[in-house]
Image: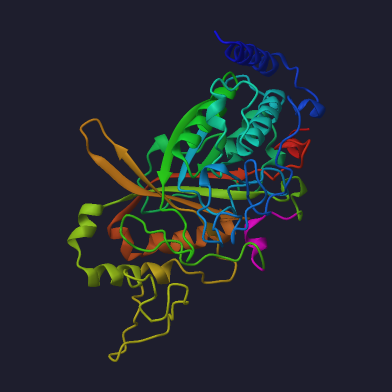
């Protein structure tokens, strides 16, 4: 065994001892091996490992110059009022990992895990290996890595801390279009991991799940992929070929209150958010049998450009009052663009969708969408829209929700702090 391998193995034993023995009891014990290289707060521009901040137009990911961006060395800031991975420009690869607390785990043990995860995530995001990393070379290219931690409704009941659970944190009520698979349901903990490199992503996932051993066990894992974001901001197309994510709130400006939880009524959650993750199976064979007119009629948009059928560009609002010469609406009353649109200003939320593919033992491939929606209050913002879609949406002819889960995403933390500190300390 080499000297470095031996040191890493020794550190691994130390970490396991700390987790199980309770030696991480104080907040001051968070920094297990010094501070974190990235001292910027969430919302500042991304930087590159070994260099100055990149001059990107959105979080440093979209280069403004002619030189290609060193994607492998991009660093997304970890510390700040909000967790990274929510308002961050979506990475090309993501995985959602749900875990359940092991029997007998309580507040103390969860606090230890949050401290360890905080330190590990901060290191991985900055391009440095965690203390017990057996493959430290894989941590050297962060590739815009973000890890977002969430808690599920069941966690609070297990811990006897129901008074800390946000009032909206509960499974969505049953919807008539759902055909839910219990494999992709509610869980106690969530790790949402995103990166521009699948190697970086897999390494972070393996390490963080391993760090939870003895405290929490995996329940499900859902990987997804999407096209890289380009300068025009509209590069994403789902597997139906439609431009996705065409209407988003301005969460960095006037619509920030739609995304982030404020201090009113739940000060310990200030700066946090929520995630509704819907796994939607897509009937690609049926979709391909429909002609282009039928497809655009169902969506309410031009498939080539993403623009509304009422005209304009991809970002042009849909004119729901436009009618054809015969008096029929240009956009069908049950078109997705009409049903999914907000009927009130607060019925808006941030979306970061990913495509998934699941291969069965016989080689059959199921394709679908991991629809990730972020908002301050899903009961007020997300549920009314979802109910309209369940009531009548032409896309329901080709889509079926097969998974659903709701999580409260923790507020961010400053340097020296840890995720969930205000809730568990």
Quadrant of the rendered structure where residue 318 is? bottom left
For the N terminus, the image quarter is: top right
Viewer-proximal residue among 200 and 25 = 200
> Can you see residue 212?
no
- Residue 122, position in %: x, y? 66, 36
Task: Kindly identify the residue that appears in the image at 67 percent across and 19 percent down.
Answer: 19
- In the rendered image, the residue lying farthest to the left is 289
Q: 412 or 343, which is in the foreground?
A: 412
Which residue is found at the position 47% from the left and 30% from the top?
219
The part of the chain drawn in magenta is 254-262
Is 258 colored magenta in this rendering?
Answer: yes
Q: Please provide percent x and percent y for residue 7.
A: 64, 13
Question: For residue 261: magenta?
Answer: yes
Residue 361 in sight: yes
How many numbered marks, from 0 up?
A: 0
Q: In which quadrant is the C terminus drawn?
A: top right
**Residue 210's spot in the image, x, y percent?**
54, 23
- For the view shown, which residue lies furthest in the top direction? 1
Q: Position of residue 73 (x, y in %)?
A: 56, 42
Q: Say which quarter of the image contains residue 402.
A: top left
Residue name at image x 74 percent, y 33 percent: 424
357 sits to left or right of 257: left
Measured along the vertical axis of the image, is residue 335 above or below residue 36? Answer: below
Q: Name the one closer to the observer, 315 or 406.
A: 315
Residue found farthest to the bottom: 325
Q: Is residue 190 left or right of residue 221?
A: right
């Amino acid at each position: 065994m080499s000297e470095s391998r031996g040191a890493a193995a020794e550190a691994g034993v130390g970490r396991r001892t700390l987790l199980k023995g309770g030696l991480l009891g104080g907040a001051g014990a968070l920094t297990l091996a010094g501070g974190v290289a990235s001292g910027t707060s969430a919302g500042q521009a991304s930087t590159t490992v070994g260099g100055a901040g990149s001059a990107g137009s959105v979080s440093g990911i979209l280069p403004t110059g002619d030189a290609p961006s060193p994607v492998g060395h991009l660093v997304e800031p970890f510390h700040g009022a909000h967790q990274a991975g929510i308002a961050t420009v979506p990475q090309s690869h993501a995985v959602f990992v749900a875990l359940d607390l092991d029997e007998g785990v309580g507040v103390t043990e969860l606090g230890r895990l949050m401290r360890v995860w905080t330190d590990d995530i901060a290191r991985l995001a900055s391009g440095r290996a965690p203390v017990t990393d057996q493959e430290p070379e894989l941590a050297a290219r962060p590739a815009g890595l973000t890890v977002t931690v969430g808690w599920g409704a069941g966690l609070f009941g297990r811990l006897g801390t129901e008074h800390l659970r946000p009032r909206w944190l509960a499974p969505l009520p049953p919807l008539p279009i759902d055909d839910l698979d219990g494999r992709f349901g509610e869980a106690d903990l969530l790790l949402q991991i995103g990166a521009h490199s699948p190697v970086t992503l897999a390494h972070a996932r393996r390490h963080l799940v391993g760090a939870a051993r003895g405290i929490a066990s995996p329940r499900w894992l859902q990987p997804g992929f999407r096209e890289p974001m380009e300068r025009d901001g509209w590069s994403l197309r789902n597997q139906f070929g439609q431009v996705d994510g065409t209407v988003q709130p301005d969460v960095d400006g006037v619509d920030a209150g739609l995304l982030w939880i404020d201090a009113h009524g739940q000060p310990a959650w200030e700066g946090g958010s929520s995630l509704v993750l819907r796994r939607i199976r897509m009937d690609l064979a049926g979709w391909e049998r429909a002609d282009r007119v039928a497809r655009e009629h169902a969506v309410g948009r031009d498939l080539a450009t993403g623009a509304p059928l009422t005209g304009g560009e991809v970002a042009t609002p849909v004119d729901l009052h436009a009618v054809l010469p015969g008096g029929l609406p240009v956009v069908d009353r049950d078109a997705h663009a009409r049903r999914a649109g907000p009927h009130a200003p607060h019925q808006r939320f941030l979306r970061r969708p990913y495509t998934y593919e699941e291969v069965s033992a016989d080689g059959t491939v199921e394709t679908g969408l991991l629809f990730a929606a972020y908002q301050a209050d899903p009961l007020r913002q997300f549920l009314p829209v979802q109910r309209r879609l369940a009531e009548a949406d032409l896309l329901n002819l080709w889509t079926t929700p097969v998974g659903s889960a709701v999580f409260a995403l923790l507020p961010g933390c400053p340097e020296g702090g840890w995720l969930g500190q205000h809730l568990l300390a």
